[in-house]
Image: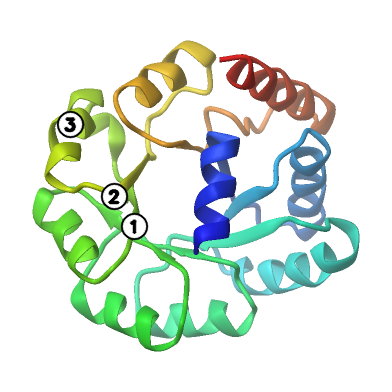
Amino acid sequence: MSLILQKIKDQKIVPLFYNESFEVSKNTLKALYEAGIRVIEYTNRGIQALENFTKLKELSATEFPELLLGIGTVKNINEMDDYANAEADFIITPVINEELVKHSVAKNINLIPGCFTPSDVNLAFQNGLRLVKIFPADALGKNYIKSIQPVFPGMNFMPTGGVNADFDDITEWLISGAIAVGLGSSLIKTEFTTEQLAEKVQNLLQQLNQN
């Protein structure tokens, strides 16, 4: 997990997306990778998710070296096992419960659980997890992370859900104590060409790394 945590910290943004089409998914992955992204979350949000993810993971071994490809929107143990078998580098959930956490520890799965309340964060913290997704981030706001961070020394926070894919908003989240943000539809817009996406991501990474 330390490698994933470090790469997420370095990258400051984690793009997340799903598309029913494998070709579109592959092209999106390629555009993100060529723009400099090395940690990506594919989301389990449609009937083709597992099949697409499995093929993307196989492809990344040869075409996208050093890419850490994880899966998001995993809600139960069966899904967790399916994606662990597909060799997901990490698994992100929108929720947290003891069963999911204990299972991930027993199976040596890199889990990044979705947390909303301090009790959620505490459950992750007490089980040795050191990175949580704060979701939905826009419902809680930037001050939330600033407020709970002192209670959980060593815990890292990645707000996701409603974060804008622009330098100013991301920077405000980072100043509030986040190590990175998850970016979905605000970054990967359906109307974007792969070239536009790559350019947008490249510019964003450049801006974030100058600070």
Disc 2 residue type (three-letter): Met
Tell me residue 40's x, y (percent). 62, 50
Per the rendering, the mark at residue 155 is 2
Q: Residue at x 23, y 26 (%)?
A: 141
**CB atoms of marks 2 and 3 within 8 Å:** no
Calculate the distance from the C-alpha at mark 2 to the C-alpha at mark 3. 14 Å
Q: Residue at x 18, y 48 (%)?
A: 152
**Residue 76 drawn above or below residue 17:** below
- Of mark 2 and mark 3, the one earlier in the sequence is 3
Disc 1 residue type (three-letter): Arg
Element carrying mark 1: loop
Element carrying mark 2: loop
For residue 199, side relative to residue 176 (left or right)? right
Calculate the distance from the C-alpha at mark 2 to the C-alpha at mark 1. 5 Å
Q: Tag 1: Cα neighbours inside 10 Å, few (<14), some, or many (≥20)?
A: many
Tell me residue 70's x, y (percent). 58, 61
- Asked where in the image residue 98 lies, by quadrant, the reply is bottom left
Does the rendering let one see residue 152?
Answer: yes
Tell me residue 45's x, y (percent). 50, 59
Q: Residue furthest top?
A: 168
- Of mark 2 and mark 1, the one earlier in the sequence is 1
Q: Quadrant of the C terminus?
A: top right
Per the rendering, the mark at residue 130 is 1
Per the rendering, the mark at residue 144 is 3
Tell me residue 28's x, y (percent). 75, 44
Calculate the distance from the C-alpha at mark 3 to the C-alpha at mark 1. 17 Å
| 188, 150: nearer the viewer | 150
For residue 158, side relative to residue 72 (left or right)? left
- Asked where in the image residue 177 lies, by quadrant, the reply is top left
Mark 3 vs mark 1: give the one in front.
1
